[in-house]
Amino acid sequence: MTKFIIRRLLGLIPTMFVLITISFFLIRLAPGGPFMLEKELPEQIRINIEKKYHMDEPLLMQYGRYLFDIARGDLGPSYRYQDHDVNYYIGQSLPNSILLGSISLTIAIIFGISAGMISALRQNTYLDYIPMGIAVVGISIPLFVVGPVMMYFLALKWKLLPTSGWITGRYGWVTIIMPAITLSLPYFAYIARLSRASILEILRSDYVRTARAKGLKESVVIFKHVLKGALLPVVSYLGPAASGIVTGSVVVEKIFRVPGLGKFFVQSAFNRDYTLIMGTVIVYAGILVIMNFLVDIAYSFLDPRVTYK
């Protein structure tokens, strides 16, 4: 097991290297540039700016310089936000996105697995139709619709919550309720449907019938025998879900004015801010590969058939 973990950790290095390389060249091959403003700069000023940021060098030399900076933990200066470097902006905004994503994913996991279990155990009853109906709504309706609707009822009409803001503002932690619920809705839906289908399959298996025939309590059968095997599809989904819930929070952050990384990701793309784009891509890619690594490790604890030698 230890050898497998070490091999997988070392395997993350070439994966990140390939992602960084592809992103670096694709961004620079795209039309436009960070200094192409609405008002065209004088030629000499543009040349001086490009020389300052080493953009007058050959592309391969720029690539080598960027790899060297990343190895030192330096994501470089921002071409548009010149008060601070990319490390500062990511360091200030990423914790907010991770906090929002973590709370949203926790909500999705707890309520998704609970809804899937209730639906499977009460199949073809109203306790099955209601959660699965909510799940279909969560999958079908986009977040840019769910967010404003929730804001209208909970904030404007019923005045239960503030319309927007963040936990550092005057309203405190209540500001995270609406964005967290909004962001968790599609992931709750997928987890609930996965849980229901997996639990139904496990309930019809031979070893569950044997456990019941031995006279075990239904709670023991469900929580010890059924859930452990039924959670495998959910665990495999959590890898991309955990990264997607952080990277996909751009819309929710915009609606509820959450000071997360999504703002810089979108604005850097519009501004052709190469270093800030690369910084956000590296962070998002790192979250994805790390979560997939953790999912592989979790598999060995949930499924005894999986061994890592």
Image (cartoon, helix red, strand yellow):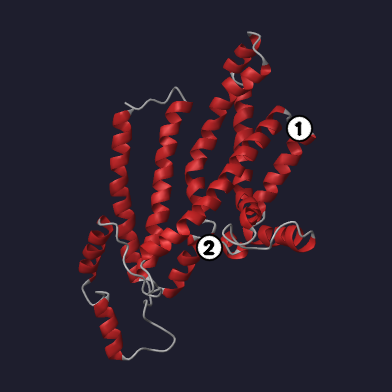
The image shows residue 155, relative to residue 207, as above or below, that is below
**201 or 301: nearer the eye?**
301
Indicate the amino acid at tag 2. Pro
Q: Earlier in the sequence, mark 1 or mark 2?
A: 1
Residue 288, given in percent of the width and then of the height, sits at 43, 48
Which residue is identified by label 2? 259
Query: Is label 1 in contact with label 2 (beta carbons under 8 Å)?
Result: no
Q: Nearer the viewer, mark 1 or mark 2?
A: 2
Residue 18 drawn at (x, y percent): 30, 54
Q: Is residue 238 left or right of residue 58?
A: right
Q: Amino acid at mark 1?
A: Asn
Within the image, what quadrant is residue 211 found in? top right
Left or right: 272 as drawn, with respect to 25? right
Q: Residue at x 70, y 61 (%)?
A: 151
**Is 63 displayed left or right of 168 in the figure?**
left
Q: Quadrant of residue 6?
A: top left
Q: Position of residue 12 (x, y in %)?
A: 32, 45
Reading the image, the residue beneath label 1 is 124
Question: Where is 154 relative to 198, above or below?
Answer: below
Residue 74 drawn above or below residue 55: above
Spatial CA span between label 1 and label 2: 43 Å
